[in-house]
Image (tube, rainbow, N blue to C red):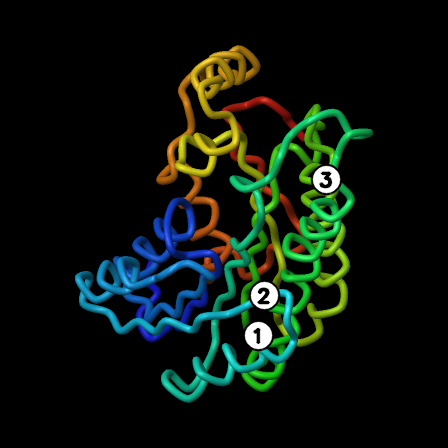
């Protein structure tokens, strides 16, 4: 795959999956804009080490004004926006417990970031993509959306909403040759997973593997191929789809 002269935005790129997406896009020739509420300096240095230009656009994805300024900063520096990877989301900081004990404020915060934030970022890049009559939006959902995640209804519901948003946007934006797809990973061995499960992490991964056809734990680099494919011209007639990267847990 060749992303030379392409401009990619990756949200939630300070670490973990987002950082890995940024790294791989840069390896393939893209200029990459990254944002997070955390410091993205390390990710920027990774992009530049690959010989590409990068941009840090600190963004609150739940804010229309903040996401608009992000898109404007990317346009000022690079002149276009070809790909948006909507990776930002709440996961590692959430409390997982039975649904009737979930904190209402945490429920609202989860929906605000994981659903509204994605919507705001899509709105922000739309003017540039419409003008170009091209673009690819890749939304990061989760296996939880189709399999169901016990004790995490706020996260499960938010990631299910991402699938509906993906399909609705694909219908709306196809006329502009803008494609919208989703990737839904199983549990990935990242810092966020360790934060969620704490000392139960190893047991959770062990149980997860029992449900997979391929019984190897997913690493960040295992998700990248699906994201790159959906972002690339190789999938120019693919839209409204969800690729499950889950080791064969759910087979659609």
Secondary structure at badge 2 equals loop
- Secondary element under disc 1, as helix, strand or loop, is helix
Distance from Cα at disc 2 to Cα at disc 1: 6 Å
Q: Give SS at disc 3.
A: helix
* Residue 67 circle label: 1
Measure how far apart labels 1 and 3 are at the Cα level: 24 Å
Neighbour tally class for label 1: few under 14, some 14-19, many 20 plus, Cα within 10 Å: many
- Tell which circle, 2 or 1, labels the residue nearer the N-terminal end: 2
| Front one among 12 and 80 | 12
Q: Are marks 2 and 1 in contact (CB under 8 Å)?
A: yes
Location of residue 6 in the rendering, given as x and y in whole percent from the top left corner: 38, 72
- Residue at coordinates 51% horizontally, 65% vertically from top-left? 84
Which of marks 2 and 3 precedes in the sequence?
Answer: 2
Give how far across and how far down residue 77 sits, in percent.
Answer: 37, 85
Drawn side of residue 141 relative to residue 7, left or right: right
Task: Report the front residue among 121 and 7.
Answer: 121
Q: Position of residue 213 (x, y in %)?
A: 52, 16
Q: Mark 2 sits on what residue? A: 61
Residue pointed to by mark 3: 154
Figure quadrant of residue 155: top right
Indicate whether 82 appears above or below 25: below
Quadrant of the snapshot with the C terminus: top right
What's the residue at 44%, 19% (across, down)? 199
* C-alpha distance separating marks 3 and 2: 18 Å
Residue 11 higher or lower than 176, as above or below: above
Upstream in sequence: badge 1 or badge 3: 1
| Residue furthest right in the image | 100
Marks 1 & 3, CB-CB < 8 Å contact: no
The residue positioned 74% from the left and 51% from the top of the image is 108
């Amino acid at each position: 795959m060749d992303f030379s002269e392409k401009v990619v935005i990756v949200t939630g790129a300070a670490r973990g999956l987002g950082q890995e997406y940024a790294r791989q896009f840069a390896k393939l020739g893209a200029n990459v804009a990254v944002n997070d509420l955390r410091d993205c300096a390390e990710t920027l240095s990774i992009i530049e080490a690959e010989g590409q230009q990068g941009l840090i656009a600190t963004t609150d994805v739940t804010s229309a004004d903040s996401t608009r300024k992000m898109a404007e900063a990317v346009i000022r520096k690079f002149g276009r926006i070809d790909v948006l990877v909507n990776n930002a989301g709440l996961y590692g900081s959430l409390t997982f417990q039975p649904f009737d004990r979930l904190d209402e404020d945490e429920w609202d915060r989860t929906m605000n970031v994981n659903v509204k934030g994605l919507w705001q970022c899509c709105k922000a890049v739309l003017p540039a993509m419409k003008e170009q009559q091209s673009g690819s939006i890749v939304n990061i959902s989760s296996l939880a959306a189709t399999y169901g995640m016990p004790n995490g209804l706020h996260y499960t519901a938010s990631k299910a909403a991402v699938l509906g948003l993906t399909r609705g946007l694909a219908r709306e934006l196809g006329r502009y040759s803008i494609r919208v797809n989703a990737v839904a990973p199983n549990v990935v061995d990242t810092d966020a997973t360790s934060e969620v499960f704490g000392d139960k992490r190893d047991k959770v991964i062990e149980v997860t593997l029992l449900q997979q056809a391929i019984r190897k734990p997913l690493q960040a680099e295992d998700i990248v191929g699906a994201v790159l494919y959906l972002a690339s011209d190789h999938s120019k007639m693919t839209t409204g789809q969800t690729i499950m990267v889950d080791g064969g847990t759910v087979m659609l």
